[in-house]
Every structure is written in C-alpha cells, then in structure tokens.
Image (spheres, rainbow, N blue to C red):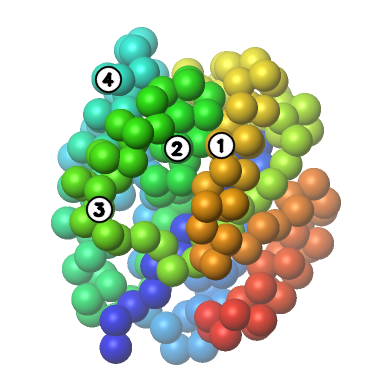
Amino acid sequence: MPGRFITFEGIDGAGKSSHIEALAAGLRERGHHVVVTREPGGTPLAERVRELVLHAPMDALTETLLVFAARRDHLTAQIEPALARGATVLCDRFTDATFAYQGGGRGFDLAVLTQLEHWVQQGRQPDVTFWFDLSAELAAQRRQAARSPDRFEQQDEAFFERVRAGYAARRDAQPQRFAVIDASGEREAVWSQIAAAMDKGGWW
C-alpha cells in the first residue's frame, strides 16, 4: 500500500513543530512506519540550501528558486521513496509555505509559483495538511520568548498577516486536504484538535 503524506503548516510561532513528534509517536504505536522531515531541508543538499534561505540576503525570485530546488531534491531522495515503501511521511512545511511566505508575504507572482509547483512536484500534493492558524500578534509574542530570529522571523506583523492570508487562500483552493487547527490555545487543547481530526478522517 502506498504511504500517506501529512504536512504541518503555519506562521512562525504557531507551535506546529512541537506536535509533529507527538503525532509520529501515535502513528508508530498503531504500527505505522513514520518518516519525520522538514522544508526547506530533509536531505543533505536541501539542508545546505536551508541555511542560505534562512540567513543569506536575497531577492524574492532567488529565494523562491532555491526553495523549489531544495524541494525537488527532497521529493526525489526522501519523500517519494518513503511513500513508495508505504511509510507515513510527516513534513514540517511544504509548498503551502512557499505560496504563503513568498507569495503572500513577499508578494511574489502566484502564476510563477504555480508553474514551479507543477514542474517540481509533478502532481504530488499532501494527503492531509494541518494548518496551525494563529494571529500574527500572538505568534510574535511566542517567537520573542522562544529563540533568536532568522531572516523570516525578523519580519514585522504585517508580513505575517500577509503570510496568514496566503495560507487561507491555499485552504480555500483545496479545502478537502486541510484540517484547520486553532493554535491559540494551550498545547493540550491544540493536540486534542489534531487527534480529533485524525479520528474523523480515519488517518490513523
């Protein structure tokens, strides 16, 4: 049986990353082989690109091309082989993030993003996407308390509201694969939403 591809999305500070391992543990308890990965990154080459994207100054087109180059390597070397083996792949960000950050946040041409998505992914989309929805204001408070900011995390609240709107547009375009998580609550409340969505969708 082919595997299932589950992605986690949301603006920086939404708290999605802390729930990926919890879901992985729950799936493993139920007998699934699970691969946990991230974008940009997931392979040695893509991790090198990640460092550039997060820390080196560049314009929106360069940023976008690097993200999709890393994604192509990630897909061919990690994601597609794992799915072919029947694994469940949990990925911290995927192409929705590119449409949200580069498209929404940076204002980059959505038609170009759509063409790159087609070339690089050849139809591959997540089976399930958990979108951790959170206001830019609350996300900023969480980021300040958590870590030193990278190049994206240094952006202002207006940028992150545009990113949030970019995610909403992707959800509206493909609602069948999105599970929207209210990320404003405590960790246990957020996890209960994830577990309920997994139950409802029969995704365990």
Identified by mark 3, the residue type is Gln
User: With respect to residue 25, does 117 lie above or below?
Assistant: above
User: With respect to residue 136, does 91 lie above or below?
Assistant: below
Identified by mark 4, the residue type is Thr
User: Image point 21% across, 47% down: which residue?
Assistant: 120
Q: Which residue is mark 2?
A: 99
- What crowding class fits label 3: few (fewer than 14 Cα within 10 Å), some (14-19), or many (20 or more)? some
Disc 2 or 4, which lies upstream in sequence?
Answer: 4
User: With respect to residue 127, does 136 lie above or below?
Assistant: above
In the drawing, does residue 34 fall left or right of residue 2? right
Identified by mark 2, the residue type is Phe
Q: Secondary structure at mark 3?
A: helix
Q: Which residue is mark 4?
A: 62
> Marks 2/4: CA distance?
15 Å
Measured as percent of width and height from the top left, residue 201 is found at: 59, 80
Disc 1 or 2, which lies upstream in sequence?
Answer: 2
Snapshot quadrant of residue 4? bottom left
Q: Secondary structure at mark 1?
A: helix
- What crowding class fits label 4: few (fewer than 14 Cα within 10 Å), some (14-19), or many (20 or more)? few
Identified by mark 1, the residue type is Gly
Snapshot quadrant of residue 149? top right
Image depth: mark 4 or mark 1 in front: 1
Q: Which residue is mark 1?
A: 166
In the drawing, does residue 149 fall left or right of residue 5? right
> Marks 3/4: CA distance?
19 Å
Snapshot quadrant of residue 12? top right
Q: Which residue is mark 3?
A: 121
The reply to whether dot 1 and dot 2 touch (C-beta < 8 Å) is yes
